[in-house]
Amino acid sequence: MTTSTTKTSGSQSTLQAPQGPSPRATGSLPPRAQWIVLGVVVAVAILLRLTFGTNLALLAVGAAVANVVVIHLWARVVEGSRAAADRTVTAVVGSAFAIAMVPLASLLFTVVTLGTNRFDVQFFTNSMLGVVGEGGGAYHAIMGTLIVTGLAALISVPIGVMTAVYLVEYGKGRLARSITFFVDVMTGIPSIVAGLFAVALFQLFFGPGIRLGIMGAVALSVLMIPVVVRSVEEMLKIVPNELREASYALGVSKWRTIVKVVLRTSVAGIATGITLAIARVIGETAPLLITLGATTGVNLNPFDGRMASLPVFSYYSYTQPGVPPQPGLDRAWAAAFVLMLIVMVLSLLARLISRLFSPKIR
């Protein structure tokens, strides 16, 4: 224990310095200790994979557990139990993230590797009408997907936005609570149920066996509306009430305040939510399988006959590839790759819209 003496006005006062940690507890791991352990564990996992052909999923889980155990023991010996607990929690979080990324990386690698085999001009310009075996393309399916998804957005966006405006700006009492409850219920509806609803609805007017592009749009809109309502509702709630009150103080009517102030302030978040809702439904297969049916030719009229779509095209190409099967499998993976690219473009578009239209802070 060390002491220090200070003279103040002819008197001496003795101050006791706090006792520091023991030299043994002051040790610390290297700055990149976590990465060193992770690198060693991954190297061992790769060696086991190459030597014994161990299952990849088992290796991933084992590597994550080994990473946590090794970093915990190392930190406990050098830094003490408290620092070891902190490093252990950090390693657990990082390992969980790594495990979650394994199937995603595997999915992306598989789709990109197999999907590029038919990623050519013919795939985007030809249909499957009269094609058996090699050749053909997915032009009819790509156009069908864009048309049906566009109609679904045209149905869902006005309904979803106006419903959210009612819940935030006007809704009170039992009706608002009932709408909120049904929106929550619709959020968890299985996609096949939405497809069956659309089929039952159109069969009431056109009879059994009807297959139309608009039926698929209605089915997708059932899935899309609650997502739009929830996203727009959250964006409207974060608009400060002071903006509304300032508008009212100037004598502006409520509906004009909503249009000119509330919606304009939250337009970035609303556009982002709508774009992500479109990306969420564009890859649905089950409702389109029973509403659109399947066709090998080009049909751009959603009110007349069956239409093709990328999810259904990929499904049938994979389950019924024909003879020889390889051309059909290549088309299936290429359709999946195109669908993934469309979703990626929509996600990037949502980020761009959010950046361009978000309020600028000066």
Image (spheres, rainbow, N blue to C red):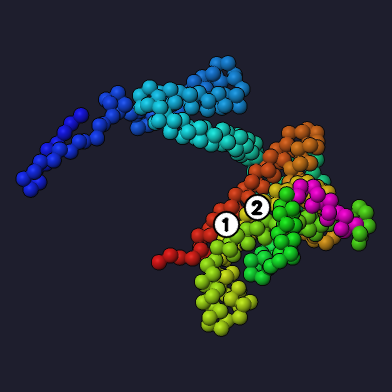
- On the question of residue 113 being in view, the answer is no
Residue 299 is labelled as none
Task: Please state which amino acid type lies under the numbered disc 1.
Answer: Ala
Furthest-right residue in view?
Answer: 207
Residue at point 59% right, 52% down? 347
* Residue 193 is covered by the magenta coloring: yes
Q: Tell me: 287 left or right of 200.
A: left
Residue at point 78% right, 55% down? 219
Residue at point 25% right, 32% down? 19
* Residue 354 is covered by the magenta coloring: no
Residue 279 is labelled as 2
Residue at point 56% right, 27% down? 60
Q: Could you classify mark 1 by the number of other residues whose Cα lies within 10 Å: few (under 14), some (14-19), or many (20 or more)?
A: many
Furthest-top residue in view?
Answer: 52
| Quadrant placement of the N terminus | top left
Location of residue 54 with respect to 274 vertically, above or below? above
* Residue picked out by circle 1: 350
Kind of element beneath mark 2 = helix
Where is residue 50, by image quadrant?
Answer: top right
Residue 263 in the image: state x and y as whole percent.
59, 69
Asked if the residue at tag 2 contacts the one at tag 1, i.e. Cβ–Cβ closer than 8 Å, the answer is yes
Residue 167 in the image: state x and y as whole percent.
67, 65
Location of residue 35 with respect to 239 vertically, above or below? above
Q: Which residues are magenta?
A: 189-203
